Amino acid sequence: MNRYSAKITQPKSQAASQAMLHATGLTTPQMGLAQVGISSVWYEGNPCNMHLNDLALEVKKGVQDAGLIGYRFNTIGVSDGISMGTPGMAYSLQSREIIADSIETVMGAQWYDANIGL
């Protein structure tokens, strides 16, 4: 179940990685659990997104209740509704690629086993 995160949580050669995870509150027994990235496009500047940080916290609780480790992280967001009819609208489509790339970057760099995207 922790096929990816085991690459940093199990080998003795990854002691520095494990120390960093311990500093986040992870215990030694939890090192064997799967880690789930909870990605969110939360930001306060948009009524569609402003509640997502609270929702991500609820998702994290559900992940923990399932016996897994959840780590929340954010990416950028752009509101089509706010930028509608302005040059800012030109950023809408490219923001989707940036969002996908940033989530992929965190997931790969942190060796999370799964992702729940909000």
Image (cartoon, rainbow, N blue to C red):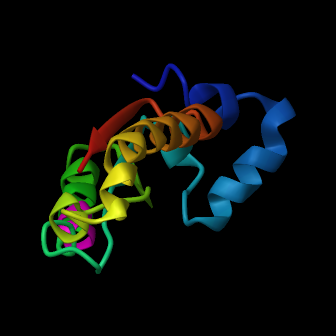
Q: Which residue is situated farthest in the bottom direction here?
A: 44
Residue at 51% x, 43% y is 102
Residue 86 at x, y = what percent? 28, 66
Q: Is residue 82 above or below residue 8?
A: below
The overriding secondary structure of the stretch rendered in magenta is: helix
Residue 99 at x, y = what percent? 42, 45
Q: Which residues are magenta?
A: 52-56
Residue at 58% x, 33% y is 111
Q: Is residue 50 above or below residue 60?
A: below
Residue at 20% x, 63% y is 85
Residue 56 at x, y = what percent? 25, 61
Give left or right: position of 40 versus 13: left
Who is closer to the viewer here, 113 or 118?
Answer: 118
Residue 107 at x, y = what percent? 51, 36
Residue 113 falls in which quadrant of the image? top left
Residue 71 falls in which quadrant of the image? bottom left
Residue 6 falls in which quadrant of the image? top right
Q: Is residue 31 above or below residue 48?
A: above
Give left or right: position of 56 versus 6: left
Give left or right: position of 81 versus 2: left
Quadrant of the image containing the N terminus: top left
Residue 45 counted in the magenta span: no
Who is closer to the viewer here, 5 or 96?
Answer: 96
